[in-house]
Amino acid sequence: MNQNGLLILYTGHGKGKTTAAFGMAYRAMGRSWPVAVVQFIKGKWMTGERLFSKEMPLLDLYVMGEGFTWESEDLSRDQKAAEKAWEICEKLMEEGRHKLLIFDEITYAMHYGWIDVERVRASLRKRSSEQTVVITGRYAPEALIADADLVTEMKPVKHPFEHGYKAQPGVDY
Amino acid sequence: MNQNGLLILYTGHGKGKTTAAFGMAYRAMGRSWPVAVVQFIKGKWMTGERLFSKEMPLLDLYVMGEGFTWESEDLSRDQKAAEKAWEICEKLMEEGRHKLLIFDEITYAMHYGWIDVERVRASLRKRSSEQTVVITGRYAPEALIADADLVTEMKPVKHPFEHGYKAQPGVDY
């Protein structure tokens, strides 16, 4: 097993997946590592993460833009956006400038068939042994779980949205 | 249900509990919230979090000091340290200066009987409705799960320590 760069998966239906990935970014920056985050969803609002990252010189945040909501009528547009985001991920791995790369909620793009799982696996295998990659999202493909060094399933025990709670800035985004 | 301050629990045996809590700190600071973290364990080394937090004016980090390792021969010393840490938590909640408070790995102190669960519940109930409290650690007491607004169990699917992996700076601490 590679003692340097790891492949880490945070999956499952519970809350805390993206949050844990951002916590890893935070920890890595404490060690002065350059960190890249590619967010495949959550492009709709200015999240706390995005506001904070502006002040973080070590953090490069790529947020999938305009209309990338998985709710679009025109599915080919979503697919194109997902492909473009994945190309950014591949480019970042090739460049090798970042020691930690977070592909946030990329699993949905694989789940819906927008990105080919085998292509993702091949690119991950080619990456430098110095790079740790964190992948988050529900429905992580089995083949990726098999490749990963660390997999945690976030299991919802109690979820505030079940009780009519509305997402709040600062806590949820 | 209180729509402002939440009680959030990250428990279970999987990795990502403390990391998710730190991710929440990161998100909250993006919203300019003052954040307090009381770490009940992990006082043994300079973690990435500690290094990073030094540069974060919004973050107050309290790390339980010297010898608080749960491995001490003198158990009364561990108990005293846990009590002292809990007093800090209570004081922070009373002061009300922080909108997010993280009591990291406090569950162990309850699990081992160093801190009384009912005392913790009473203090949490008394806190300002503006305060969100995040509690992390394995073995979260049932009574606390009942009180919490959001509970996620981090379930290990695959854990690198099973395969002879050694914890590394920047990734694990």
Image (spheres, coloured by chain):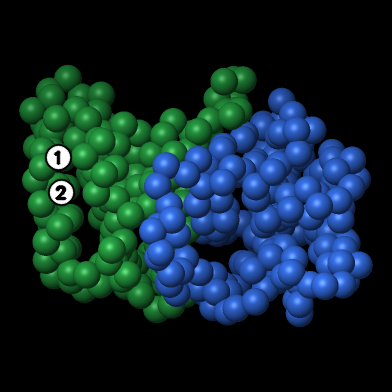
Chain colours: A green, B blue
On-image quarter of the N terminus of chain A: bottom left
* Horizontal side, residue A88 vs residue B24: left or right: left
Q: Nearer the viewer, residue A66 or A29?
A: A29
Give the SS element for disc 1: helix
Q: Nearer the viewer, residue B92 or A148?
A: A148
Where residue B87 sits in the image (x, y, percent)? 88, 61
* Horizontal side, residue B14 vs residue A91: left or right: right
The residue at 14%/40% (across/down) is A117
| Circles 2, 1 touching at the beta carbon (< 8 Å) | yes
Q: Amino acid at mark 2?
A: Arg
Q: In the rendered view, would you say B25 is above or below B70?
A: above
Q: Which residue is mark 2?
A: A121
Instruction: Give the chain of mark 2.
Output: A
Give the SS element for disc 2: helix
Please tell me the numbered disc located at residue A117.
Answer: 1
The residue at 25%/72% (across/down) is A130
